[in-house]
Amino acid sequence: MSNFNLLYESANHVPAPYHFEAMLKFLDWGSSVASLEIEIQYTDRDDFSKEELMAEGLPLEDFWSWKGPITPVWQNRLQARFDTYKSGICKPKDTEPFIMLEYEDRKTLVPRMLEMEENLIQEFFQSIFEAAGREMPLYLGFQFKDHQGNWIRIEGELSFQNLNFTYQESGSVQKTISDWERLQTLMNTIYIADFQSDKAKEELKSSQSFAVYPGDGLWYIAGDSLRKPSGNNRYFDGLENSLREIFAS
């Protein structure tokens, strides 16, 4: 068991009100009672109104803190990455975040590639916000043809805290997918599309349309409100095949 800190700051080019600094204190790391204490300080937000902050889903207070347990799945995921860190002091470029581990004996470790590590740390922040009740899991939906040519609808919650997707298929029994890498790949594929919210629907009445519900309260139909990325003519075929593979019964 050990105690250590992770120091984080957004890259210099990240503007207010999104720019923040964070101190994460890991306690009893490696044990069944491992816990976390986190403090986040948002910077340079004086020019933003409460309404603007709320519209961006940000807390109204400049300072936020929380303490609670760390799930084993996150302990394992973080430790696998921490094992790749090297000794040194973090000296980020303007486009890179500040990420550094600090131990009680004053030893410091840094990621080998800061920009790549940013994705992991942001997912961990999201898991903390879920655990603290500050944010809810991301509600997602997909309607597509399965391998047999039948239209099915998938709806459920993507949890960063538990690193899984819990869903129902056309109202059937609840299922869970815990292959986070495949889920990440799917999310990366979905969010490069062009979402045209002015054409999207709050309710998907058609049961025979390829559609995506990306978590913003609207359904986007392929070829209408959901447009393929520029130059990617096989985007919809690839996305539908990915959905079939992931949600194969």
Image (cartoon, grey):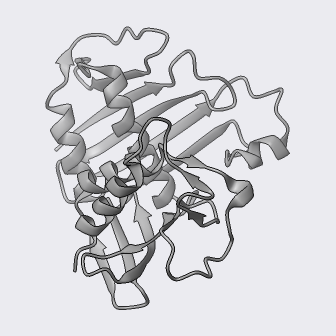
Residue at the extreme bottom: 172
- In the image, is residue 48 above or below residue 142? above
Residue at 66% x, 25% y: name it: 43
- In the image, is residue 42 above or below residue 14? below
Residue at 63% x, 57% y: name it: 225
- The residue lying toward the viewer, choosing from 227 and 109, is 227
- In the image, is residue 174 above or below residue 7? below
Residue 188, percent across and down? 39, 45
In this picture, residue 153 sits left or right of residue 46: left
Q: Tell me the quarter of the picture where residue 60 sits.
A: top right
Residue at the extreme front: 233
Q: Quadrant of the N terminus?
A: top left
Residue 116, percent across and down? 32, 27
Residue 246, percent across and down? 26, 66
- The residue lying toward the viewer, choosing from 207 and 233, is 233
Residue at 55% x, 36% y: name it: 40
Q: Quadrant of the C terminus?
A: bottom left
- In the image, is residue 231 above or below residue 168? above
Count of labels in the image: 0
Q: Tell me the quarter of the picture where residue 223 sits.
A: bottom right
- The residue lying toward the viewer, choosing from 173 and 218, is 218
Residue 145, percent across and down? 36, 75
Q: Tell me the quarter of the picture where residue 14 sits.
A: top right
In this picture, residue 231 sits left or right of residue 185: right
